[in-house]
Image (tube, rainbow, N blue to C red):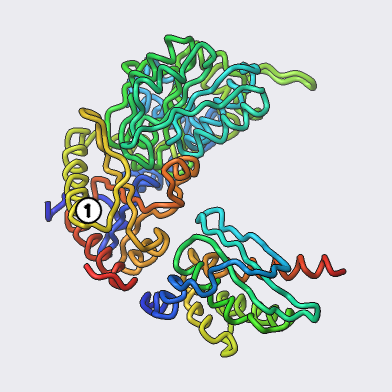
């Protein structure tokens, strides 16, 4: 694969952007995600309303450009979505990075479609989404 | 230098343009080793130490020849002082579980440098937890060395085991080996040396070192994966109870009791990796064919050249600096400003350059250095100045991809 198709302006801009890298005033969930073998780590913060809408999402953390940019792009994608819409996007993302279809609703996250040919880096791109899934699953078990 | 005579010994390079800069993780294998192992399976394969037929005797002979070859290579007094295991990690676990677990008491201390690979850290940590002993760390100075004062302060009458890598896999410099072993013995502690990184670059003489145990991995010295070596002083090895039990390590077995064979067989349960040991013999022959002086000359030139090229790049930070008179090994750990090591490795991989990036199985050291992860290049006899030139070009390209100027 052409490596420049991964380290695009979109990825580099999200990697260095501070927009989604902050703490939320209202946190309904704070969940840690780590890739132990890399040392990548993020703390994902969510503000989910009573009617299951993700009002805001942010993260803080350290790691490679792929892990940090992917988390930031994920934050942009799921902000304003319902929990079930966010879960659907997550499913589409994981399907894509495993070499499946590239769904246009993933918008900027489609840049990570090339991860399917970079097995060593799949977990980097997945970190934000995996942490989101953990947060949503914990939220669900709490509300039951 | 443009015509490195050793590259053609390594089929992996063939016609490819691979730049392999991760020999500290595992070395590439010369044809001599690959063919020796293939030859064993083609014409000598049988289960050693058992069959009463010629083929099994031949397998036994080759296996024991490997023991003798390695014993001579490290100047062990007797082949029976070499135990074959899977790797250095297994050798250290054997020492932790067979020796330390049976001897440590609450209040005792195990001393290791903070720079240790997880293989020489986690087994001691776990055994200390089980026995109530404490794991004490020797901290490094700013250059990655251990000062005499630190040694005097940490290795005390409470110390029962001192275990350390002669050359660390992150800093690439030789620790004060003689001093650590002498201090361990002065306080009555057992001295264990991990020679995994050192033996591919320097002569290891276990009698001159006077260590009580030493561990090695064949795959870091041009041999195959799956073969590790434990050397021990006779009286120490003989005191070790079996680690794994089963076939090949027994003397006599009844329904409820068993007596065990003498060392080394007592510590080698089950059918051993004969082909791997045959490969080790070939790897030793390969290294002896080149000789340490030639290996060191080539590697020193590569290391000095790489450090010189790095020093001209203000956005590269190199970790570790050898003490005056101590060896600098062909292993350089560094960071690239503004680019995470994993992104560096991916961008270099796209150019056909293999480097290591991450915590190098030394998380406590990374924490101590205040870095999450780093990049590492390491060299061997098949590397060239051209490889380093390509590395530099690729690093400059990586910086450009990330939007930095030169």
Q: Residue at x 29, y 51 (%)?
A: B317
Q: Nearer the viewer, residue B137 or B362?
A: B137
Disc 1: CA contacts within 10 A as few (<14), some (14-19) or many (>=20): some
Instruction: Report the label total.
Output: 1
* Residue B145 as seen in the image, left or right of residue B83: left
Location of residue A110 with respect to B222 vertically, above or below: below
The chain under label 1 reads: B
Q: Which image quarter holds the C terminus of chain B? A: bottom left
Q: Can residue B287 be seen in this view?
A: no
Name the quadrant containing residue B285.
Answer: top left
Q: Where is residue B38 in the image (x, y as percent from the top left)?
A: 40, 47
In the current view of this chain or complex, which residue is farthest to the right?
A: A144
Name the quadrant containing residue B73.
Answer: top left
* Residue A94 as seen in the image, left or right of residue B211: right
Q: Position of residue B268 (x, y in %)?
A: 56, 28
Q: Which residue is drawn at 47% across and 44% down?
A: B367
Q: Where is residue B239 in the image (x, y as percent from the top left)?
A: 57, 13
Q: Can residue B107 be seen in this view?
A: yes
* Residue B277 as seen in the image, left or right of residue B294: right
Location of residue A88 with respect to B167 vertically, above or below: below
Q: Which residue is drawn at 55% across and 64% down?
A: A60
Location of residue B15 with respect to A12 vertically, above or below: above
In the current view of this chain or complex, which residue is farthest to the bottom?
A: A104
Query: Mark 1 highlights which residue?
Result: B310
Q: Where is residue A119 in the image (x, y as percent from the top left)?
A: 50, 67
Name the quadrant containing residue A92.
Answer: bottom right
SS for dot 1? helix
Q: Nearer the viewer, residue B63 or B98?
A: B98
* Residue B72 as seen in the image, left or right of residue A42: left
């Amino acid at each position: 694969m052409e490596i420049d198709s991964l380290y695009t302006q979109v990825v580099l801009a999200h990697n260095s952007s501070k927009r989604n890298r902050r703490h939320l005033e209202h946190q309904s969930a704070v969940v840690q995600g780590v890739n132990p073998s890399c040392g990548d780590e993020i703390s994902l913060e969510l503000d989910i309303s009573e009617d299951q809408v993700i009002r805001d999402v942010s993260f803080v953390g350290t790691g490679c450009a792929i892990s940090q940019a992917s988390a930031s792009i994920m934050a942009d994608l799921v902000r304003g979505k319902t929990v079930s819409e966010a879960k659907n996007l997550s499913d589409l993302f994981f399907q894509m990075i495993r070499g499946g279809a590239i769904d246009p609703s993933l918008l900027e996250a489609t840049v990570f479609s090339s991860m399917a040919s970079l097995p060593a880096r799949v977990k980097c791109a997945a970190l934000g989404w995996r942490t989101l899934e953990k947060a949503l699953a914990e939220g669900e078990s709490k509300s039951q | 230098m443009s015509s490195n005579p050793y590259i053609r010994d390594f089929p992996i390079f063939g016609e490819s343009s691979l730049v392999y800069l991760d020999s500290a993780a595992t070395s590439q294998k010369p044809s001599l080793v690959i063919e020796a192992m293939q030859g064993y399976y083609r014409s000598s394969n049988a289960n050693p130490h058992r069959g009463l037929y010629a083929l099994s005797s031949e397998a036994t002979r080759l296996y024991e020849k490997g023991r003798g070859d390695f014993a001579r290579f490290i100047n062990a007094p007797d082949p029976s002082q070499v135990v074959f295991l899977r790797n250095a990690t297994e050798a250290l676990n054997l020492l932790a579980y067979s020796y330390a677990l049976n001897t440590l008491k609450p209040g005792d201390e195990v001393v290791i440098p903070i720079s240790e690979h997880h293989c020489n850290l986690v087994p001691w940590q776990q055994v200390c937890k089980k026995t109530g002993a404490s794991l004490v760390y020797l901290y490094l100075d700013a250059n990655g060395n251990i000062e005499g004062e630190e040694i005097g302060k940490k290795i005390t009458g409470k110390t029962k085991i001192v275990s350390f890598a002669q050359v660390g896999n992150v800093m690439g410099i030789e620790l004060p080996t003689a001093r650590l072993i002498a201090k361990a013995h002065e306080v009555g502690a057992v001295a264990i040396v991990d020679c995994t990184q050192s033996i591919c670059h320097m002569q290891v003489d276990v009698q001159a070192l006077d260590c009580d145990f030493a561990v090695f991995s064949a795959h870091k010295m041009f041999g195959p994966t799956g073969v590790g070596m434990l050397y021990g002083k006779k009286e120490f090895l003989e005191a070790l109870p079996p680690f794994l039990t089963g076939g090949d390590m027994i003397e006599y077995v009844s329904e409820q009791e068993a007596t065990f064979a003498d060392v080394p067989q007592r510590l080698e349960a089950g059918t051993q990796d004969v082909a791997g040991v045959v490969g080790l013999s070939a790897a030793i022959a390969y290294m002896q064919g080149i000789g340490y002086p030639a290996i060191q000359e080539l590697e020193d030139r590569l290391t000095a050249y790489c450090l010189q090229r790095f020093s001209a790049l203000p956005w590269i930070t190199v970790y570790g600096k050898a003490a005056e008179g101590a060896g600098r090994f062909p292993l350089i750990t560094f960071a690239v400003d503004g680019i995470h090591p994993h992104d560096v490795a991916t961008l270099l991989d796209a150019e056909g350059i293999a480097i290591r990036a991450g915590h190098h199985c030394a998380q406590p050291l990374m924490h101590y250095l205040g870095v999450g992860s780093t990049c590492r290049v390491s060299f061997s006899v098949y590397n060239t100045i051209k490889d380093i030139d390509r590395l530099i070009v690729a690093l400059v390209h990586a910086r450009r991809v990330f939007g930095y100027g030169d």
